[in-house]
């Protein structure tokens, strides 16, 4: 492991290559975390805690590893005044923790709402053509108002922001009246990897294969250009999970994200 210094049992990781080595080439680390890093990571056993800036530019933590190792690493960082300790950085606003280790992390590090449960996955395989893809068409800035209207009425939780970053590739489907009834975008993570966002179908058009068609078209484009495609989804969307798995997505990472409460934010004398 390059450029790593051992301190009181934990190892500080200063490069993206260090993270990949420590995690055995984990797909989320490879495709989602920026290089150079947003700050040093820390490892202990299978556990990793590393700063991660989301595509909305908010700085948080990613926490991976077994429940026991995550608890040990969190205790190590909260129990010592380490330099480069991300738990003491006031700019770090939230923590995204592998769900199997969430309770262990939260037993050491105070967390609070707002937050959410979500999943990440990726594929390296082009999906087969699906019937409704014949209806999928490119969208551009002239379609922005229609895209925003569809997202507002049919997918208010999405983080997709039409044409707010360079190189977005929007596609969609219109009905016989010309109304946009399905859309999606191929964007880039801060690491540069392709990511699907804003996959949306108007309620009365769901179950007709339009979401599958939009997803397949964008996934194929990403795999052809970059060799991979990634996405995130809310964990309560069972239909989307089946669709993505059916198109070949895997390497699932199941996350719980919550707001981080810093030690300096706790009332004097309070114990967690």
Image (spheres, grey):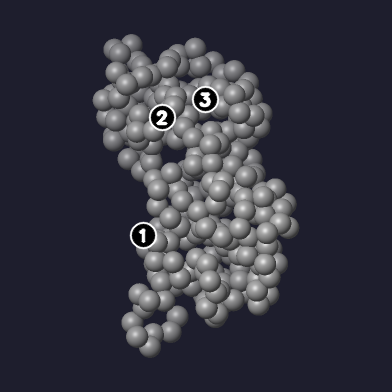
The residue wearing badge 1 is 114
Nearer to us in this view, 161 or 174: 161
Q: Using the numbered discs, state the Cα–Cα distance from disc 2 to disc 1 in whole angstroms.
A: 29 Å
Q: Earlier in the sequence, mark 3 or mark 2?
A: 2
Secondary structure beneath label 3: helix
The residue wearing badge 2 is 166
Q: Using the numbered discs, state the Cα–Cα distance from disc 3 to disc 2 in whole angstroms.
A: 17 Å
Circle 1: is it few (<14), some (14-19), or many (20+) Cα within 10 Å? Answer: few
Q: Which mark is residue 91?
A: none
The residue wearing badge 3 is 218
Q: State yes or no: discs 3 and 2 in contact (Cβ < 8 Å).
A: no
Residue 91 visible here: yes
Nearer to us in this view, 18 or 60: 18
Q: Is residue 252 above or below residue 65?
A: above
Circle 2: is it few (<14), some (14-19), or many (20+) Cα within 10 Å? Answer: few
Circle 3: is it few (<14), some (14-19), or many (20+) Cα within 10 Å? Answer: many
Q: Position of residue 128 (x, y in %)?
A: 63, 21
């Amino acid at each position: 492991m390059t450029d790593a210094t051992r301190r009181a049992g934990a190892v500080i990781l200063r490069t993206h290559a260090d993270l990949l080595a420590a995690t055995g080439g984990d797909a989320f680390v490879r495709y989602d975390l920026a290089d150079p890093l947003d700050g040093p990571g820390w490892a202990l056993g299978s556990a990793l805690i590393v700063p991660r800036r989301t595509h909305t530019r908010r700085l948080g933590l990613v926490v991976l590893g077994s429940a026991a190792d995550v608890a040990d690493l969190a205790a190590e960082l909260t129990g010592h005044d380490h330099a480069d300790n991300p738990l003491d950085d006031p700019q770090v606003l939230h923590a995204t923790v592998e769900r199997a280790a969430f309770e262990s992390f939260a037993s050491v590090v105070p967390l609070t709402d707002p937050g959410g449960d979500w999943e990440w996955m990726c594929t390296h395989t082009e999906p087969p053509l699906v019937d409704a893809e014949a209806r999928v068409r490119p969208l551009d800035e002239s379609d922005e108002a229609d895209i925003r209207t569809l997202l507002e009425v049919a997918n208010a939780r999405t983080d997709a922001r039409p044409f707010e970053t360079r190189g977005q590739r929007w596609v969609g489907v219109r009905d016989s009246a010309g109304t946009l009834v399905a859309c999606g975008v191929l964007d880039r993570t801060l690491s540069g990897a392709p990511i699907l966002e804003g996959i949306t179908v108007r309620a009365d058009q769901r179950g007709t294969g339009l979401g599958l068609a939009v997803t397949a078209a964008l996934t194929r484009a990403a795999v052809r250009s970059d060799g991979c495609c990634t996405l995130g989804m809310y964990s309560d969307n069972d239909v989307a999970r089946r669709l993505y798995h059916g198109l070949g997505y895997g390497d699932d990472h199941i996350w719980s994200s919550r707001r981080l409460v810093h030690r300096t934010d706790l009332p004097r004398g309070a114990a967690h």
